[in-house]
Image: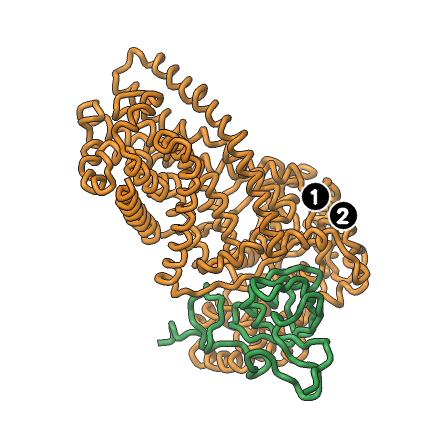
Amino acid sequence: MRRGRGVLGRRRGRQDQGSVPEDVVQVLGQLGPMSVRAAGGPSLIRLGALKKGERATIEGFEAGHSLVSRLAALGFTPGAEVEMIQNFGQGPVIVGVRDTRIALGRGEAAKVLVRDARPPVIG
Amino acid sequence: MALAGQPNVGKSTVFNLLTGLSQHVGNWPGKTVERKEGVYSHNGTEVQIVDLPGTYSLSANSAEELIARDYIIKERPDVVVAVVNASSMERNLYLVAELLPLRSPVIVAVNMMDVAEQHGVKVEPEVLEAALGVPVVPMVATKNQGIRELVEAIDELVSDGTRYQPKQPEIREDHVEILSELRELVAPYVPAPYPEDWVSLKLLEGDEEILEMMEERLPEGVWEEVHAILRKHEDAVVSVASGRYEWVGRMTRAALVRPRIGQVTLTERLDRWATHPLWGLLVLAGILGLVFWLTYSVGAPLQGLLETYVVAGSAELAAGALSGAPVWLTSLVVDGLIGGVGTVLTFIPILIIFFAFLGLLEDVGYMARAGYVMDRFMHLMGLHGKSFMPLFLGFGCNVPAVMGTRVIESRRGRLLTAMLAPLVPCTARMMVLAFFTPLFFGSAAPLVAWGLVALSLAVLAVSGVVINKVAFGGELSAFIMELPLYHVPNGRTIGLLIWQRSLAFFKRAGTVILVVSVLLWALSALPTGEIETSYLAAIGRLLAPVGALMGLSWQMMVALVASFVAKENAIASLGVLYGSGEASLAQILPQILTPAAALGYLVVQMLFIPCVATVATVLHETNSWKWTLFNVVFLLVVSFGMGVLVYQVASLFG
């Protein structure tokens, strides 16, 4: 029976937009809960960790296919520059990307990985 | 001709300009997505326009996107006009990059040139036209600029297609080989109207609908091969999207002048207040307060005037005209039709105020901010910011609230919001509240009334948490929402919006209410012609044991049942049952009801099954008998449960 097997191991439901552990599209491989230091370069962090006014470049996602697809269509693609417009440490954030202001839930903002322009912290 | 575009580009303004009032609003077959169609004539030819739903891309992310691409692929419009927003060209041209590989020729209408200029963005249409190889028309639709040029460009493209030479977006180099490999594998099996290149690209993107389509059509062996390739390149969706953006970047490099960095725009200044976690809430509260104030200071008196002059007047007229007719006919027309349908229609002024405000807030760009500041609170119920406005609309009337759930992308969120919307106290319920509370609670009446509203909202919140946990496993849907730039509202757009929404309410409410009004009238008149001995009274007596738990007589239970047609019918039917007018009812009620029982009654009335128009709308929007029935039963249980609880507790305190 081929029907119902699910394509690419993905669940069939069309409405699930949260992350589904088995089919997480990992553009960057495994990451720690908060941030991971790429060797020598500036640190790789989650978009939600940026403070107001900080800019960074998108590196990848840790999210299910449908969320990645929606984010990418809105301009969140690797290499694109983002600016954190509002982040109060809780609740949704506002991010500027490609001349647009996008409100993102905190959960969604945590699934976008960015390379911070800040110099790496020593120690 | 089809009109495509992302949300917030002024697409409906362009559509309204082209078609004027000659438009037809309906639904896409089998979907609760609005479908607008219209015609205009130019040089003697009639052009048909279909307004496609606003979409950011043409993937399978939402019903809107599936509808838009299906229409273009299967109906092959002669021209697709892609309306783009001049102030966010890059993101808007992404959709154009998705439209070009389809077979219909594309015209790019660059709208909101004025908004872009205010924000320091300059677009050069000629340069863009040369780069893209498709006609580009600059527009300011709100000021009626560029519409003639657009019509001419359409005409030209249709009459002479030879000059149409679009540059096709290319895929990024790292996936070129894989794409051609895929294409070779699947090309012989791609069904008729679908372009082979497009299907291969969508497969690479992991598009669910196309994957399912091709899985059915490909022979087992080929599918295995395709499947293996796709598995290996699961991240291609990002690469394909990046490729499109890189292409857009090259196309716009010369045609776009960006503002200096650091320039503080109007939107930025306003958002410092409107999206602030504290000030934003105050701004929202202020705006909502203004809506309420207008509703009750202007809308409610107007409603009263309609009630006394139009409804009562036409009832008198009808009674006079039917004086020779049998009594039952007079009763059917006066009590059944005019009393039921007429009463509901008196709510139109209140609705218009609500629709006008919502239209204004939407057009200005504020609505997204309201959703943003409310997101934190909606999260508690497993909903997000976009559910706030439909629920707020419920304070005016539950029908547009349920209809408004369409703005929510996920079916889960839509369902949950529609289930909760009937718990928002609508104006009709507020009127019952306003009638009852002064009779029983004297100077504490406003306090009781606000307490009951607060109780409704608390029940709403708890129900949200519970339904979300039980039915949806507590899952949260993603919150991604564009915050459009603020701009000056357009009266025409708002006017048409009010007109269309009021019309939709009329149609939806009018038909169902007509049927149920007649039915309820029949129940109250049959078999003897006297309500005290009617079937309706029998139902009331049947419910009396439940009523007894709340200290309510069978007459009060009948009033609850009668409120199914329209909430404020409760008062009218009590008037009939106690054989008095509304005025003397005010004197009779305190003698037969204890304050505790009155409180219990009001609690039930607030949380009871919504009016029939709302139930019909829930059925229509959820497209599910199961969910509609669940909603009715759920509200019955909750309302009686809370009613009994409040009565018993209140009785303890006397």
Question: The chain shown in green is which?
Answer: A
Residue B437 spot, x, y in % from top left: 38, 33
Quadrant placement of the C terminus of chain B: top left
Q: Image point 56% across, 74% down: which residue?
A: B204
Along the line of sight, the residue nearer the viewer: B239 or B550? B550
Residue B547 image-quadrant placement: top left
Q: Which amino acid does label 1 sit on?
A: Val
Along the line of sight, the residue nearer the viewer: B211 or A68? A68
* Whether residue B356 can be seen here: yes
Chain bearing mark 1: B
Residue B574 spot, x, y in % from top left: 29, 28
Q: Is mark 2 on a helix, strand or loop?
A: helix
- Mark with earlier residue (2, 1): 2
- Mark 1 — residue? B488
Q: Image point 43% across, 46% down: which residue?
A: B454
User: Seen in the image, is B624 located left or right of residue B19?
Assistant: left
- Mark 2 — residue? B114
Along the line of sight, the residue nearer the viewer: A46 or B215? A46
Question: The chain shown in orange is which?
Answer: B
Instruction: Respond whether the residues carrying marks 2 and 1 are from the same subunit.
Output: yes
